């Protein structure tokens, strides 16, 4: 049976979803934009600041599940503009290390929160 996990260091869900679902030996982390934990608003400072905040939120969720960023095996990046990808990659490189997770990047036409430029979701080992 899948287990839902929530972090008190990440923004509260604004819908009917879990921060993390533990299923088998994997942790499926919800997609994070640059949501500030205290307010749920998108952080100011553009794609670099939003990516930084998304990675912090992912780290908080993985920690709540007893895991860490170095156990990420799969990453999906959704961006409003592929021109942001080099910046997104540079920021995530500060949080991830080799062996790099497999990754997909997709340009999309909109995200759930106004002003969001990037959303990242991951799968990690438990």
Image (cartoon, grey):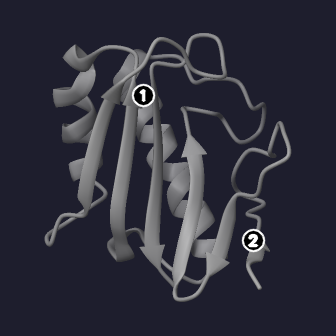
Q: CA distance from mark 1 to mark 2?
A: 26 Å
Residue in the picture at 37% in, 69% down: 72
Q: Secondary structure at mark 2?
A: strand
88 lies left or right of 10? left
Residue 56: image location, x then y, percent:
50, 51
Q: Mark 2 = which residue?
A: 5
Q: Quadrant of residue 62?
A: bottom right
Q: Mark 1 = which residue?
A: 49
* Label 2 CA crowd tier, 10 Å (few <14, some 14–19, many 20+): some
Q: Quadrant of residue 46?
A: top left
43 lies left or right of 51? right
Residue in the picture at 70% in, 24% down: 41
37 lies left or right of 78? right
Which mark's residue is nearer the viewer, 1 or 2? 2
Q: Secondary structure at mark 1?
A: helix
Residue 29: image location, x then y, percent:
57, 60
């Amino acid at each position: 049976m899948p287990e839902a996990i929530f972090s008190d260091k990440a923004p509260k869900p604004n819908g009917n979803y879990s921060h993390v679902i533990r299923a088998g030996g994997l942790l499926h982390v919800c997609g994070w934009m640059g949501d500030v934990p205290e307010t749920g608003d998108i952080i100011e400072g553009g794609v670099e600041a939003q990516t930084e905040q998304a990675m912090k939120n992912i780290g908080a969720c993985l920690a709540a599940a007893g895991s860490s960023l170095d156990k990420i095996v799969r990453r999906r990046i959704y961006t409003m503009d592929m021109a942001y990808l080099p910046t997104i990659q540079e920021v995530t490189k500060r949080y991830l290390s080799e062996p790099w997770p497999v990754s997909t990047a997709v340009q999309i036409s909109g995200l759930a929160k106004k002003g969001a430029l990037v959303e990242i979701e991951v799968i990690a080992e438990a």
